[in-house]
Image: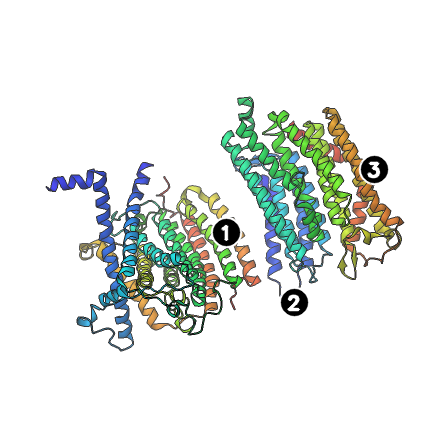
Amino acid sequence: MHDVIASYFPVLVFGVIAVGIAGAMLGGSLLAGHQKPYAEKTSAYECGFEAFDDARRRFDVRFYLVAILFIIFDLEVAFLFPWAVSLSHVGLFGFLSMLGFLGMLTVGFIYEWCKGALDWD
Amino acid sequence: MNWIIAFPELVLTLCGLVILTVGVVQKKSTNPFAACSMLTIAAFAITGFLVTVSPDGSGYEHVFVNDGFARFMKVLSLIGGALATIMTLSYRGTSGGGRFELPVLILFSTIGTMLMASSDNMMTLFVGLELSSLAIYILCAFDRDSVVSSESGLKYFILGSLASGLLLYGISLTYGYGGTMEYGAIRTVLIQSGGASLGLMLGIVFLIAGLAFKLSAVPFHMWTPDVYQGAPTPVTAYLAGAPKIATFALILRIMAGPFGALAPQWQLLIEMISVLSMVFGSLAAIPQTNIKRLMAYSSIGHMGYALMGLAAATPGGIRGTLVYLTTYLFMNVGVFAGIAAMRRKGHETTDIADLSGLGRTSPGLALMMAIFMFSMLGMPPTAGFFGKLMVFSAAYGAGLYGLLAIGAITSAIGAYYYLRIVKVMYFDASAPAFDTRSPSLAFLSVSMGIVTALFVLVLGPVTSAAQAAASALIG
Amino acid sequence: MIATLSNFLFHTMLGHVVLVALETLAVLVPLLLGVAYLTLAERKVMAAMQLRKGPNVNGPFGVLQAFADAIKMLTKETVIPSGANRFLFLFAPFLTFSLAMVAWAVIPTGNGIAVADINVGVLYLLAISSLGVYGILIAGWASNSKYAFLGGLRSAAQMVSYEVSIGLIIVSVLLAVGSLNLNDIVLAQRHVWFCLPMFPMFILFFISALAETNRAPFDLPEGESELVAGFFVEYSALAFGLFFLGEYANMFLMSGMTSILFLGGWLPPVGIAPFTWIPGPIWLIVKILFCLFCFIWVRATFPRYRYDQLMRLGWKVFLPLSLAWMIGTAGFLMATGLLPHQGVS
């Protein structure tokens, strides 16, 4: 157990250094550059027009749909990972169980497909 | 791996997937709604047969059990599902025309209820309950173009997630303090330790709270009137039937099984819930003018009566509860078939006043409704009488005289609003006649009326089946 | 002296940290240099393909162009739009760039040689590369500009769509390996690289990698002709630079993943004399460079996809194909008894 945690220690050091480099670059740029903001410069780019309203408003529900589908299928993949590496241990029953699970998801996939949830027009 | 004991569930799941696929691959021009409904009813029938011949046993690493009790509850759930599906045949949403997902969702929800009836582990309990509930959340909001339907679905979803949270909290407390999620093992732990720690008691309270929510028992009833009123009528009929029966299966199984040794502790809790439900259900129903809301309060009261049998904590009490649920299932479907028939010029009307003079404009429907109302209040010789008789006598046998007295008083109060409907139908000035009933609704209300009125003929077999189920549980 | 140093490095806690830090820099410095020169390489390669010269002013053949760009970006003004959320606006590029680097912690450059040889390396890579979508979403939202917002949404939807097939393709590989450790995955390819038996998955993975890094022909989120650079339209100076570098670092990462999963990582093509003389890291670098060249080659060759075509390709072609291949692989390995028996202890 201790060894497993110890093997992650370099990840932590790596992360700290990477974050440090990124922070140094961003901070260095803020310090090195000559900052001179004014109203026209800091207004949002809208092809030369004045920005007429807030950009954070309602957007297409399809993005939400894609997110939901992603969660379903990504969870499926998350189930597949441990199954894939232990397939020789779980044997035929494990294989068939996963096949059943995937079959059920496939029916859901067919349903989405036929309902047009995957169309983007 | 004794996987064959879940064969009926597997068959029903497979049928559901096939029906869903069949429904969705149809061309846009053909509406597969009727075909899918018929297929669903057939699937229920096949599964019902498989359930009755399924063997006893436990499997899947002690998460799934099949015994007489599970079979009894599963058959009731399947009947509830099938009757609701028959009712959907006549269903037309606000925008007209049914969508085939309706029967399929009822089917999936019923699989959840079957799983609940067979749970032998807190995990199965939760998975079954969620499977059944998630489908019902969608079903409640099924009429997408109707504001009340969407409201009903959303309310049920939000409050239902809260209840699931409570339930999960109870499960985790039980697991934490008991060290296991298997019913049998929890029972052993409790017997060995000679009592429950405070944490485990807290866990049981949360479990009861979560399940009482699904039963719509006071004080967890607040969702019931709005959801009943807003949901499409066949969905309300389903909601009041199979899921409640399955929740009863859960609550009976965990109270009699793992927590059986703690009966003196939880008995008081169940008694209180039962009393509150009976009192609240009968009093709050009086001022209602909408029949679906009235039925919601009525169902709160009925859950109180059914819990009376559990409060007795005897085999006789459990038998009483089971018979009560059986009678409730039939008369409930009958009433909702009547409500679904309340349509004028294609629009649903759900005010009690709309029933005025039904005795003259539609004598057949009025007669059936009158039978259901008499049964609901427990008038002999209708079905409701026998259910009430059995739970009351069990309470008497267990010495719960206070509970018995309150039950009797609330029944008398209930008589007022049930009889008011009969009065409106037969003695008020006639309102315009309803549209012609569709064959499926006529079939349902007539057949349920016959079952309710002549329940005495099947009383023997039902009671002995319930007796066998109860003894499988307490044994 | 040497004994003291080695004692310090290998037997004290602080020494261990210093050692790991040195290893980290040994990976990050070449990586950052590589990223800087990838921008130049891209311009040069594209120029060659279009019969132009490309950058040729700064230094011989323009080799100092990368540094000129860096200095220019460093000294520019960081414009923060008035409607933006200042913290998130600056946090987004920082996050994108950090993640692109952090992922390199687990990439093995030789047999058992990695900064962190962890037991679930593939999961780590998948997790870190999935987090990349946050930087883009945050940037799109924090800018409070319509182009940025739309670009961010499109980019997020595109990345998550292709991530599903990437996950399934990785599962196919894992079936043949039986371990989540990246070193084991490379070692499993001693006899044959996975790009041969799993050629369709190799192609699918490469295309998904293009989509995952928002590269041409899937560079819709930036789509300069309609979204004027998408989610980073409001960025300037090194905040912009970090996005830019992060994107190129992600290309490196995806090339690294392709090399490890399908091209045998640090293994030579055949295990015989002249090839085995060349050390593993060189082989890995050669393979990564080959993949990067393909990235640029594709950009110079293919026109941009339309958004509906992109989503259709991801959900209706790649997902069913990779799922079917995964099931087929599992079934084949089960039937022939070729399942690996390592892993799972």
Q: Amino acid at mark 3?
A: Met
Image location of residue A57, percent across then percent down:
51, 63
Confirm or deny contact between disc 1 and disc 2 (CB under 8 A).
no
- Protein chain holding label 1: A
Q: Which residue is mark 3?
A: B379
Give the camera-side residue of C30 and B85: C30
- Protein chain holding label 3: B
Horizontal side of B387 relative to A118 (left or right) equals: right
Q: Amino acid at mark 1?
A: Leu
3 or 2: tag closer to the N-terminus? 2
Q: Quadrant of the C terminus of chain C?
A: top left
Image location of residue C109, percent across then percent down:
25, 52
Give the camera-side residue of B311 and A56: A56
Callout 1 crowding tier (Cα within 10 Å): few <14, some 14–19, many ≥20:
some
Q: Amino acid at mark 2?
A: Ser
Callout 2 crowding tier (Cα within 10 Å): few <14, some 14–19, many ≥20:
few
Residue placed farthest to the bottom in the image? Answer: C51
Q: Secondary structure at mark 3?
A: loop
Distance from label 3 to label 2 (Cα)? Answer: 50 Å
Give the camera-side residue of B313 and C242: C242
Horizontal side of C120 relative to B326 (left or right) equals: left
- Protein chain holding label 2: B
Q: Residue at x 71, y 33 (%)?
A: B275
Q: Which residue is mark 1?
A: A102
Is B199 rendered above or below residue B417?
above
Q: Secondary structure at mark 2?
A: loop
Of badges 3 and 2, the one in the foreground is 3
Question: Which disc, if any, is residue B29?
Answer: 2
Distance from label 1 to label 2 (Cα)? Answer: 30 Å
Image location of residue A30, percent across then percent down:
29, 60
